[in-house]
Amino acid sequence: MTYQQLNNLHTQLKSVLTSSNEEDFKSGHLEKLEEICDDLESILDPEPSDQEMMAAFGTKWHDGL
């Protein structure tokens, strides 16, 4: 799947989740769809880990200087 296809899927899923009622879904399905939507969002716009953020600001040896 390409990035554009994932982005389209995420957009459509988010639209369904915001425009529908909980009664429209069988028990447990709404939570699963929200989980899938969150997973897609993390794939499309990943948040850097703490390790990646610390690495972006240089090495530790000069932090105390």
Image (cartoon, rainbow, N blue to C red):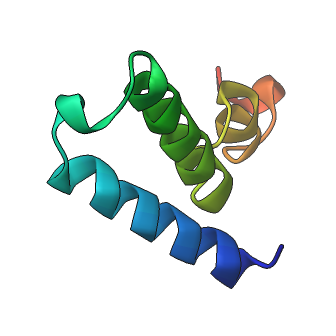
Location of the N terminus (image quadrant): bottom right
At 56% across and 68% down in the image, what residue appears? 9
Q: Which residue: 65% across, 39% down?
A: 53
Image location of residue 4, percent across then percent down: 66, 83
Q: How many labels sit on residues? A: 0
Residue at (78%, 25%) from the top-left corner?
60
Q: Is 8 located above or below residue 10 in the figure?
A: below
Is 27 positioned to the left or the right of 63 in the image? Answer: left
Give the image location of residue 14, x and y in percent: 36, 56
Residue in the foreground of this view, choosing between 52 and 22: 22
Give the quadrant of the C terminus.
top right
In the rendered image, which quarter is residue 58 located in? top right
In the rendered image, residue 31, in percent from the top left (x then y), is placed at: 43, 23
Task: Determine whether, in the image, residue 59 is placed left or right of residue 54.
Answer: right
Reply above or below: 9 against 36: below
Quadrant location of residue 3? bottom right
Q: Which of 37 and 57 is in front in this view?
A: 37
Q: Position of residue 21 (x, y in %)?
A: 16, 39
Please name the residue shown 19% across and 48% down the image: 20
